[in-house]
Image: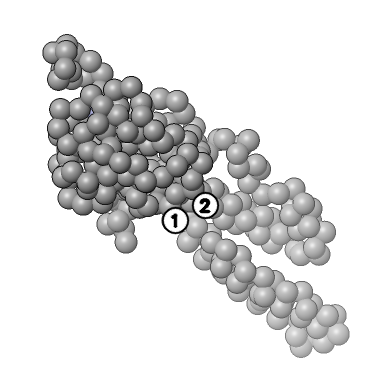
Amino acid sequence: MAASIDEAEPRQSRALVSEPYQVTTVGFRARPDHLETEQEEFLSEIEDRVVESSEQTRGVLRLTGVSTASLTDDEAVGGPLVPQDFVAYLRDSGLNPAFAERVAQVAARVSESRRLDGIAQSTPLAAPVAVDYRETSGYGQRIDPFTGRPTFHSGLDMAAFERAPVVATSPGTVVYAGTRSGYGYTVEIDHGHGFKTRYAHLRDIQVQRGDTVAIGQRVGSMGSTGRSTATHLHYEVWFRGRSVDPVNFLRAGRHVHEQG
Ligand SMILES: [Zn+2]
């Protein structure tokens, strides 16, 4: 996205520089109009690209089951779409007002696309097990293997082998690394934009509270600590204080990879 804006600037200044010709040389009168048309086409091209990109990102986020509306109307986080000083700059720029209006519109689209990209960055879309795994128990109501009673299973169980690498599913900050009752060795990551993930029953932990982790960074090894009957990862995804079904996120993540 940054490249689009940078590319737009030389063209803008070229038009402004060529304006004196309009006054001094009748023969060049047609030129600014021609340039303006060229710039409008260029703006439309940028707009089409960012709108398409925003639509793709929205589509992926929709697959997670989390409302993008609730994410994007978070003005406190993102601020207004186009800064007021930029709007004032355009107004005072001497550009044709209709054209300045178009620039502001496209800038708003670029800004929206950037914000969506930021949200997508925070969304845990990757798989938490870096090798082939089986999903052994899903999210939702199930019979507790210890008590035989129906209980709510707040995560997804994923089995591979003892010591299989367990990795962060999006960038973030480790907010918990230690033993949790029932969960055994556990790592919890805050990804921002309301997303958190939890990795439980680990054999060992390879990060510390406060660490910044990258997507795909190893946080520990698959094990069977805590209330666990066999080697597996218990993986949870949280959005704004509520657990959500990790399967939707993994599915959305696979969609991202298919898009290239
Ligand atoms: Zn589980």
Disc 1, disc 2: CB below 8 Å? yes
Q: Is mark 2 within 8 Å of ligand 1?
A: no
Name the residue located 19 percent from the left edge and 37 percent from the top edge: 232
Q: How is the image coloured?
A: one colour
Q: Residue furthest right?
A: 24
Q: Is residue 95 left or right of residue 218?
A: right
| Above or below, comparing residue 4 to residue 256 in the picture | below
User: Looking at the rendering, which quadrant does residue 15 occupy?
Assistant: bottom right
Name the residue located 28 percent from the left edge and 37 percent from the top edge: 202
User: Looking at the rendering, which quadrant does residue 11 occupy?
Assistant: bottom right
- Which quarter of the image is occupied by the C terminus? bottom left
| Above or below, comparing residue 183 to residue 249 in the picture | above
* Residue that label 1 marks: 53
> Residue 164 at x, y = what percent?
22, 48
Q: Secondary structure at mark 2?
A: helix
Q: Amino acid at mark 2?
A: Ser
Q: Nearer the viewer, residue 68 or 45?
A: 68
Q: Is residue 163 left or right of residue 124?
A: left
Judge whether residue 245 can be spotted in this image. Answer: no
Q: Amino acid at mark 1?
A: Ser
* Residue that label 2 marks: 113
| Above or below, comparing residue 114 to residue 154 in the picture | below
Q: Nearer the viewer, residue 112 or 214?
A: 214
User: Looking at the rendering, which quadrant does residue 147 occupy?
Assistant: top left
> Residue 121 at x, y = what percent?
45, 49
Q: CA distance from mark 1 to mark 2?
A: 7 Å
Q: Nearer the viewer, residue 129 or 17?
A: 129
Q: Nearer the viewer, residue 188 or 53?
A: 188
